[in-house]
């Protein structure tokens, strides 16, 4: 396979090239796949069903929902918004991968290669911010629809610049993207996205659990960690018994050592962690220093799985 260079896209072979995110496609994953395809060539793909927020974004921005990834002979895959084996779709082999654009740490179970790979990983608030920067630095114009979905990716992953993962580049690029997209009030757009994500009354409990669910392997221990960001936490807290039942089935089916589900209240910027069993209670107690009450652990000021929730668990399991 010819070397794929993120710095010289005009020299790349783009036949059968697709851009793909992780197994629970959110707004950053979908926006980044669409943006990368426009910038570097190829087509965007998805690895799972869209959540309510991302379905709203795709409709609002007027873009087609990317097709589901499938195995194709001679396929080349650029990855966006992740770098872990546990989040890679089964139809993608390592030998298919030609590039990675991501904003997550390289931790347990990273995707590895036998040859050098073109990789862009930065500690920014979203992969969409990185794509916006690449468009600008490379002097490439983007369509208004791509600007719209990239903006959505930034607003989603930074929780409209309120998440602790937000960096100094996110807001300036969001403002530039809003101008290209013709969106006068990016905060109103972000609020509409949050409202679309929050109303989960008609979503099955299993789909709530798996809507933003990631797998990790730390020091030989398998951890599943789901998150739902919502302005209506009470709607999910009322379904705690059903969530625990689905967590039991998922833990068994996936052979997990630990399973967690965080209900993130985006209005108060706190979380409620659903605790499945004594094993999770012990690990979470050590990680967060809070008490469990009626299968719930209240985590004040904790919103981000990426920078707060998972690092604490990883620290305990790695000790």
Image (cartoon, helix red, strand yellow):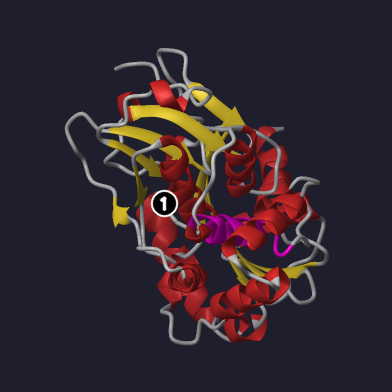
- Predominant secondary structure in magenta? helix
Tell me if I can see residue 165 in this picture.
no
Examine the rendered structure and indicate whether residue 233 appears above or below residue 264: below
Q: Residue furthest top?
A: 115
Examine the rendered structure and indicate whether residue 198 appears above or below residue 257: below
The C terminus: image quadrant: top right
Q: Residue at x 72, y 68 (%)?
A: 271
Element under label 1? loop
Q: Residue furthest left?
A: 73
Tell me where the magenta segment starts and ends, as one range: 146-160
Describe residue 259's horizontal placement relative to residue 66 as left or right: right
Dot 1 corresponds to which residue? 23
The x, y position of residue 318, in whole percent, is 67, 33
The x, y position of residue 7, in whole percent, is 53, 23
Q: Nearer the viewer, residue 306 or 205?
A: 306
Q: Nearer the viewer, residue 289 or 47?
A: 47
The x, y position of residue 238, in whole percent, is 59, 86
Q: Is residue 215 magenta?
A: no
The x, y position of residue 109, in whole percent, is 50, 32
Describe residue 305's horizontal placement relative to residue 213 as left or right: right
Q: Residue at x 42, y 12 (%)?
A: 115
């Amino acid at each position: 396979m010819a070397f794929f260079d993120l710095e010289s896209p005009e020299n790349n072979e783009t036949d059968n090239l697709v851009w793909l995110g992780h197994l629970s496609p959110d707004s950053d994953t979908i926006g980044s796949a669409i943006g990368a395809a426009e910038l570097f060539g190829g087509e965007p793909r998805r690895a799972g069903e869209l959540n309510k927020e991302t379905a709203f974004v795709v409709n609002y921005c007027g873009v087609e929902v990317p097709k589901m990834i499938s195995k194709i002979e001679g396929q080349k895959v650029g990855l966006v918004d992740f770098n872990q084996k546990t989040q890679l779709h089964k139809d993608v082999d390592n030998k298919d991968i030609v590039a990675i654009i991501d904003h997550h740490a390289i931790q347990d179970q990273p995707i590895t290669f036998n040859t050098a790979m073109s990789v862009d990983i930065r500690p920014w608030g979203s992969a969409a911010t990185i794509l916006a920067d690449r468009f600008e630095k490379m002097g490439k114009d983007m369509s208004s629809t791509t600007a719209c979905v990239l903006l959505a990716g930034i607003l989603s992953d930074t929780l409209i610049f309120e998440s602790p993962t937000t960096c100094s580049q996110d807001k300036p690029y969001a403002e530039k993207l809003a101008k290209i997209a013709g969106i006068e009030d990016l905060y109103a757009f972000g609020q509409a996205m949050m409202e679309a994500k929050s109303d989960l009354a008609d979503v099955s409990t299993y789909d709530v659990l798996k809507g933003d669910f990631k797998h990790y392997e730390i020091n030989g221990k398998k951890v599943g960690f789901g998150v739902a960001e919502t302005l209506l936490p009470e709607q999910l807290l009322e379904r705690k018994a059903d969530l625990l039942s689905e967590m039991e089935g998922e833990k068994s089916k996936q052979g997990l050592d630990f399973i967690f589900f965080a209900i993130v209240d985006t209005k108060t910027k706190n979380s409620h962690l659903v605790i499945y069993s004594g094993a999770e209670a012990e690990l979470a107690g050590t990680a967060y220093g809070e008490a469990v009450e009626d299968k719930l652990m209240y985590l004040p000021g904790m919103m981000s799985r990426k920078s707060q929730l998972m690092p604490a668990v990883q620290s305990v399991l790695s000790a």
